[in-house]
Amino acid sequence: MRYAQVALLPSGGETQTDAAGAFQFTDLAPGEYILAAGKAGFVSQDEEEVGLAVNLTESREKVVIRLLPLASIRGKVADDSGDAVEGATVIAMASGVRQGRRGTQLIQAVQTNDRGEYRIGSLRPGKYLIRVDNPTAHGGFYGKGGTTLPSPDSFAPLFYGGSRDAAQATPLDLQAGAEARADVPVVLRPAHTIRGRMAGYRPHTGAVLQLSAGESDLGLNVSSIEFNTGRFEIRGVLDGAYRLRAYQSGEGGEMRIAEGDIEVSGKDVEDFAITLVAPPALRGTVVVQGSAESEADFWVQLQTRDAFVALNNQLDSLRSGEVTDGGFEIASVFPGKYWVDFHTGEGQYVASARAGQNDLLATQELIVPSGALPAIEVVLRTDGGAVTGTVGVALATDEVALLLVPEACNRPAEIAALEQGAFRIPDVAPGRYRLYAWKSVFEVEYGAPARLCALARGGVPVEVIAGKETKIQVEKLMEEPK
């Protein structure tokens, strides 16, 4: 690869490859270096690595750095008459596993031109879902503004291949340097306009409106807000049941939210009112059992399951503060569904966690309603056991990950990594488990209860005894149950 930039870090300098792709660095002191390369239109072969680690004790030759050419997707969005759909939002999404749970991540979004065509470039090789959504635009005005014209026809969002559901969508397997084609036909239907007003609106301050038909809906729309009064309108709305949300920053920078359920049926909706308020805090209590001298070392994290909220890095993940006088809180928790993860310090494990009648360890899901929030009650214990062990010579690599799954699938799995061929999983609740060994790069789903229960039927049986250490020898990698 000619004329690529190559850097040797730290302080090794930079150079450029010649016409044959060759490069060299001279007069280097012995030590640990990172060798990194880049060129426009190319990307590192390993997305997670910043470069190639080099332990330099003597001169090295024929070192190879591999870059992959970026790929692209192009296509056309047309209606059922074959006419171009201008301004449609086309989104490239990648499916992946985060904290053991599979989901989709928005990689890039573009809009179709006047011929209904689009192109999404600079994509890493891999599998992508293509979703076509409504035009999206957020504007504002002073004075009367707005419009009384009928809304243009619209369409229901869908994925390439015709599915409305991401789980059933047809993925595009994008090869390095290739350009894939994804044409998406849509069916236009009569649409309507929602007009209303936000009470508690801060004048002259922008706000975001989201009209969502469900937690997987990105809530894209064409909306406008009158800056003085908070009057708004949303155009291009199909018949159906929705939840309307508005987001606006308060005077101190805190986020405020308004929401309400709305039904659109055959005509425009007028004078719909919602009120902006600061979301309440989610509070809980923590009790430590098993040691009178132990203080709670604990925090909880909420991961939103709402696709629109997940697009905002400030709202997609919420974390509690320190435990004070046996209590904790997460400020400003919006209504909706969340995955919930508990974290403890050394010497403690979560024995139980409940929100009302909901067993949060078993479901790993918290539903936050509008209005009063449920209190979380957590019990920690200090009598956990440990699972330690080594792996066979063939597996003695730090790329192997260990997963410990409860047979009763009534609590989250424990995960650990190898260090010099050995592993240790401390502070495990007593009980019967199944142990798995996988390559860490393998995308394993273990965070959702259904997948957890499937994993509880395989692996190597392990019994964890209170206050004891269980030793295991792992000889081979294991397959994920189907």
Image (cartoon, grey):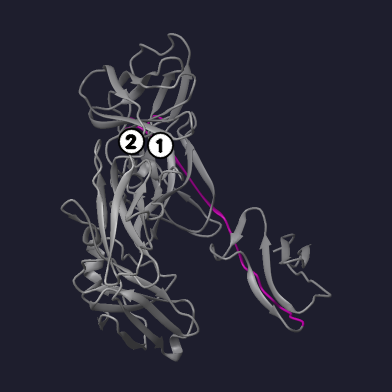
* Residue identifier under label 1: 77
Could you tell me residue 306's position as x and y percent?
A: 33, 44
* On screen, residue 89 above or below 169: above
* On screen, residue 204 above or below 349: above
In contact (CB < 8 Å): disc 1 and disc 2: yes
Q: Is residue 28 magenta?
A: no
* Residue identifier under label 2: 186
Could you tell me residue 264's position as x and y percent?
A: 23, 24
Q: Nearer the viewer, residue 127 or 228?
A: 228
Q: Nearer the viewer, residue 400 or 170?
A: 400
Q: Is residue 65 magenta?
A: yes
Counting labels gives 2
Quarter assignment of residue 246 = top left
Circle 1 packing at 10 Å, graded few (<14), some (14-19), many (20+), is many
Could you tell me residue 455's position as x and y percent?
A: 25, 72
Position of the N terminus by quadrant = bottom right
Circle 2 packing at 10 Å, graded few (<14), some (14-19), many (20+), is many
Q: State left or right for residue 269 relative to residue 103.
A: left
Secondary structure, mark 2, is loop
Q: Which residues are magenta?
A: 59-84
Q: Amino acid at mark 1?
A: Val
